[in-house]
Image (cartoon, grey):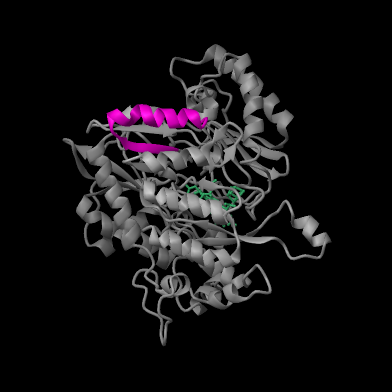
Amino acid sequence: MPPKLSELEHIKERSRQLRGSIAAGLADPVTGSISEADTKLLKFHGSYQQDDRDLREERRRQKLEPLYAFMLRARLPGGVVTPAQWLVFDRLATDYASSGLRITTRQTFQLHGVLKGNLKPTIAAIHHAMASTIAACGDVLRNVVATPLPEQSGLHAQAYAWAAKLSAELAPQTTAYLELWLDGEKLVGEPEPEPLYGKIYLPRKFKIGLAIPPLNDIDVFAQDLGLIAIEEDGRLAGFNLAIGGGMGATHGDPTTYPRLAEVIGFVTPEQLRAAAEEVIAIQRDWGDRSERKHARLKYTLDHRGTEVFKAELERRLGFALQPARAFRFDHNGDRYGWTGGEDGRWHLTLHIESGRLLDRGPQRLQSGMRELARVHTGDFRLTCNQNVIVANVDADDRARIDAIVAAHGMDGYRRQSGMRRHAIACVALPTCGLAMAESERYLPTVLERLEARLEHHGLLDAPILLRLSGCPNGCSRPYLGEIALVGRAIGRYDLRLGADFSGQRMNVTYRENVDEPAILDALDPLFAAYAAGREPGEGFGDFLWRTGVLATPAPRPERRIAAQVPA
Ligand code: SRM
Ligand code: SF4
């Protein structure tokens, strides 16, 4: 007997291609929310219903409904934003959102706290700015990420073009989006067919990311489908395919785990579109639709076997993948400050703590970016590390850009500790419904305390990857942090250590369910040892393995190392 489908599969099937009763729910003035089933469908349109968790208890006592509001996420392939688009997002954040603009770990913007009645004008404005929110969430191909730093301008332009193409061509086709948000014609009769997704879409979200070695700034091995661009003789020869990455896990459930993608072969640019589509299609057909916890591609692969999956892919494609080509990643994370491109243009990477663009004290990040957008003639790139690149600046404009940056307190990257520059925290409380502990709001405090210890050991400048997540879902890709805190409960975290600095080795649990004093006490002697015993250029994570601090091999698949083809 086939396994029982999860309830969400039925909701999708009944939804008439993602319509459900969303229109009626939006029009209902009695509540700030929409129905439970519609909240699931709304995700495919780029929005999550949330409520302010700081106010939950108080409102319950006052017998008020929770303070419902919506998070809205844009689809911005490759994280490229024009100055005109920036100004639209900035205005929407000012008019409708509760906490500024938020750059996400997948190179896009989120707005939080959008009230139900403001969803439609916000989505419409994003559409008119030539962007979208369709499929930014939901069981579909999500925002396609790509290395944003356009130093190798020719190669980068091609990589970006591929991200945009895959994003556009593999997006859902439903006209429900036009109908609901853009006053498109109402559907009469049967919904239009969805050639790739069918009536029930994918079993789960699906993520594609494209990296150009030696920079793994998008964490390519955390993607369901990672594309590693291969350059030969100065041109894009094609892509290695890496499949089955994913970070999510559930505490106490060993059947769920983070996993790095495995390299299975190479395709030419002409073969890429078909290969990506077929990987998605096999996952559509083979993925687990009975248990959402096991529905990502990584579980399909571990259940069926990667070789079996690859054989099916080659059968559907009608050609064999070529052997993977050599590649080498040097590091992940972003590099700050100015870098020059091959074409003589300049790019300035700015550090945005947790990606939150707000005006707070001397750091006026939202206003500063608005000023930059008013004068900048190039474009902006959002990074997967929640930062922003002011890209394609003429040499003559550098001084003017620097002045705006300094006037708004955005030049902190020049002075920050190595750890601060490489820290990522997920959103967590108060908006994330799944958060078990603080993350973004805790980052400033924990960084200060860690920096005090690092300074004591003379390590303030040491680049160390710190990642915080408010729960094990792993939105900051914490399993790829040299140090990671993964939330368990308010004030309590798993302390994980030992990832490398290039996104190719995951960390392992070092202390389970500990509070801040225990975290600092555990780290302090390790910092001391690292300061005294590190080899030139050796990362903190590598040092912990070399010196035997992390000696016990973790059970599969925690230490699975992405199959790297040595260069
Ligand atoms: Fe995530 C769910 C925020 C990147 C794995 N993620 C959520 C939700 C929507 C909570 C929910 O389902 O109710 C969070 C909304 C919080 C809020 O209030 O804004 C949320 N995820 C985020 C963002 C905003 C984190 C950030 O601080 O930037 C990132 C938005 C990305 C985007 O623009 O599309 C974000 N999430 C990620 C990543 C990182 C990545 O993709 O590179 C991961 C790990 C990679 C992966 O997918 O495996 C990630 N998010 C999850 C999961 C676990 C999925 C799983 O397979 O188990 C969930 C929970 C779920 O889907 O059930 C989740
Ligand atoms: Fe929320 Fe957990 Fe993702 Fe953080 S890691 S944003 S707490 S789902």
Q: Residue at x 38, y 37 (%)?
A: 390
Taking the image as drawn, is residue 6 in sight?
no
Q: Residue 241: give x, y in percent of width and height.
A: 32, 48
Q: Residue at the location (68% across, 30% down)?
A: 519
Residue 555, image x, y percentages? 55, 41
Horizontal side, residue 258 vs residue 130: left or right? right
Whole-percent x and y of residue 106? Answer: 45, 48
Q: Is residue 394 magenta?
A: yes
Q: Tell whether position 257 is magenta.
A: no
For the residue pair 74 and 13, the one nearer the viewer reads as 74
- The residue positioned 65% from the left and 74% from the top of the image is 29
Q: Is residue 489 left or right of residue 232?
A: right
Placement of 318 over or under 110, stated as above or below: below
- In which quadrant is the C terminus drawn? top left
Does residue 1 lie above or below 137 as drawn? below
Residue nearer the viewer, 177 or 144: 177
Segment colored magenta: 388-410
Please tell me in which quadrant of the rendered image residue 7 appears: bottom right
Quadrant position of residue 6: bottom right
Q: Residue 226 at what x, y percent from top left?
A: 37, 47
How many marks the image carries: the answer is: 0
Left or right: 518 in relation to 414: right
Residue positioned most to the left: 233
Q: Is residue 26 above or below residue 532?
A: below
